[in-house]
Every structure is written in structure tokens, then in C-alpha cells.
């Protein structure tokens, strides 16, 4: 007989890890957009807001990384998924070919 609790926990962890991976993709894309906007912006007020948003994205990336690291040795999550999340959160937000 299948353990329903294990299956639902696994599905929940897959959903959570998947959502965080998608969020990292959104963070990376928005970060690149902000850098482009900063380069082209001439309004000091807008620059302040752009830098503030940029810093918030960096902080959120670090939060996700710390959470993933804390889940690494937990039996509640698929370890391959956690390793993947750790990998993408440890990469720089912008690469030389972006």
C-alpha cells in the first residue's frame, strides 16, 4: 500500500522547489533588465528606485540559497532537486554572455 503522507510531502517539496527555481529565473531576468535600465537612466529618483530593487533581488536570491542549504540534509526534499536549486542560486545573477 502506498504511503499517502510520503507522496503528498514529495509533491509539496517538488512544487516548492520548482516554484523557487522559477522565481530564480524571474529574479535573473529582472536583474538584467534593471542593469540595462540603470545604464540608460538619467533620472536620479528613478536610479534610486532601480538600485533599491536591484538590492532586493540580490537579497531574495541569498534567502533562497540559505533555505536550500538548510534543506540539503533534510529527508523532506528530493536531494537532486535541492542540489539543483543550490547550484542555480550560487551562480551570479548576470553572466558575461547575458
Image (tube, rainbow, N blue to C red):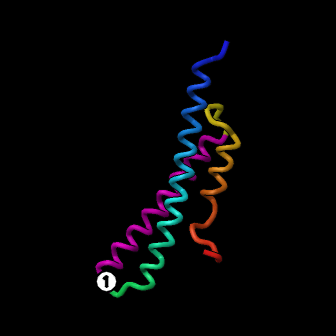
The secondary structure making up most of the magenta span is helix
Q: Answer whether residue 85 is magenta in the image.
A: no
- Give the tally of numbered discs: 1
Q: Nearer the viewer, residue 54 or 23?
A: 23
Q: Quadrant of the C terminus?
A: bottom right
In this view, 17 is above or below 11 = below
Q: Position of residue 51 (x, y in %)?
A: 40, 73
Q: Which residue is mark 1?
A: 44
Q: Nearer the viewer, residue 75 or 24?
A: 24
Q: Nearer the viewer, residue 30 or 87?
A: 30
Residue drawn at the location 35% of the way across and 87% of the way down: 42
Q: Quadrant of the N terminus?
A: top right
Q: Quadrant of residue 73?
A: top right
Q: Which residues are magenta?
A: 43-72
In this view, 16 is above or below 98 = above
Question: For the residue carrying disc 1, how many other residues have a C-alpha within 10 Å: few (<14), some (14-19), or many (20+)?
Answer: few
Residue drawn at the location 47% of the way across and 60% of the way down: 59
Residue 32 appears left or right of 2: left
Q: Position of residue 63 (x, y in %)?
A: 50, 53
The furthest residue to the top: 1
The furthest residue to the bottom: 42
Q: Answer whether residue 57 is magenta in the image.
A: yes
Residue 23 appears left or right of 43: right
Q: Position of residue 30 (x, y in %)?
A: 47, 66
The furthest residue to the right: 80
SS state under label 1: helix
Residue drawn at the location 47% of the way across and 79% of the way down: 36
Q: Position of residue 31 (x, y in %)?
A: 49, 69
Q: Quadrant of residue 56?
A: bottom left
The furthest residue to the left: 45
Amino acid at each position: 500500500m502506498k504511503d499517502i503522507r510520503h507522496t503528498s510531502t514529495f509533491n509539496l517539496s517538488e512544487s516548492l522547489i520548482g516554484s523557487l527555481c522559477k522565481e530564480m529565473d524571474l529574479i535573473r531576468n529582472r536583474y538584467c533588465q534593471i542593469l540595462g535600465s540603470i545604464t540608460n537612466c538619467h533620472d536620479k529618483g528613478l536610479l534610486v528606485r532601480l538600485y533599491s530593487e536591484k538590492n532586493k533581488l540580490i537579497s531574495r536570491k541569498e534567502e533562497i540559497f540559505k533555505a536550500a542549504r538548510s534543506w540539503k540534509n533534510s529527508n523532506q526534499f528530493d536531494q537532486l532537486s535541492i542540489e539543483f536549486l543550490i547550484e542555480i542560486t550560487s551562480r551570479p545573477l548576470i553572466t558575461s554572455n547575458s
